[in-house]
Image: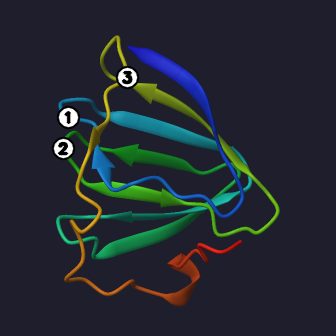
């Protein structure tokens, strides 16, 4: 197993990615995060401090910090001894509209 602390800056987002054969559990320490997932990015939820998240192996997903001024932090535990991130092309979900306006991050901020 592997564990670590991640901090995502205000207005930042990860690329669309998966963690290969790893299962991941995350605990939100502070802030909030919007998460998209699914083969087409068709699912989303907002996580707040105190929430847990389970990401099964091979699941495409993306984390977005919708705040303009508050980072979010989470503790992450993965099922293998080394962290693994497989980045997917930026246009992986291009045929899917963003599910709601709060998932959009203004690139000019």
Helix, strand or loop status at disc 1: loop
Packing grade of label 3 (10 A; few <14, some 14-19, many >=20) is some
* Residue position marked by numbered label 3 in the rendering: 83
Query: 51 or 77: which is nearer to us?
Result: 77
- Vertical placement of residue 37 versus 86, above or below: below
Packing grade of label 1 (10 A; few <14, some 14-19, many >=20) is some
Packing grade of label 2 (10 A; few <14, some 14-19, many >=20) is some
Residue 20, label in figure: 1
Helix, strand or loop status at disc 2: loop
Quadrant assignment, res 18: top left
Quadrant for the N terminus, please: top left
Helix, strand or loop status at disc 3: loop
x%, y% of residue 54?
39, 45
Q: CA distance from mark 3 to mark 1?
A: 10 Å
Query: 37 or 50: which is nearer to us?
Result: 37
x%, y% of residue 57?
22, 39
Determine the residue positioned at 24% across, 72% down. 93
The mark nearer the N terminus, 1 or 2, is 1
Marks 1 and 2 in Cβ contact (< 8 Å): yes
Quadrant for the C terminus, please: bottom right
Q: CA distance from mark 3 to mark 2?
A: 13 Å
Marks 3 and 2 in Cβ contact (< 8 Å): no
Q: How many marks?
A: 3
The mark nearer the N terminus, 3 or 2, is 2
x%, y% of residue 70?
80, 58
Determine the residue positioned at 58% across, 74% down. 105
* Residue position marked by numbered label 2 in the rendering: 58
């Amino acid at each position: 197993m592997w564990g670590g602390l991640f901090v995502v800056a205000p207005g930042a987002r990860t690329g669309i990615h998966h963690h290969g054969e790893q299962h991941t559990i995350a605990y939100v320490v502070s802030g909030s995060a919007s998460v998209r997932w699914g083969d087409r990015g068709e699912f989303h939820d907002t996580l707040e401090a105190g929430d847990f998240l389970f990401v099964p192996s091979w699941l495409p997903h993306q984390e977005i910090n919708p705040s303009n001024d508050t980072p979010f932090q989470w503790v992450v535990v993965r099922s293998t001894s080394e962290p693994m991130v497989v980045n997917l092309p930026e246009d992986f979900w291009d045929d899917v509209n963003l599910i709601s306006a709060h998932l959009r991050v203004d690139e000019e901020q």
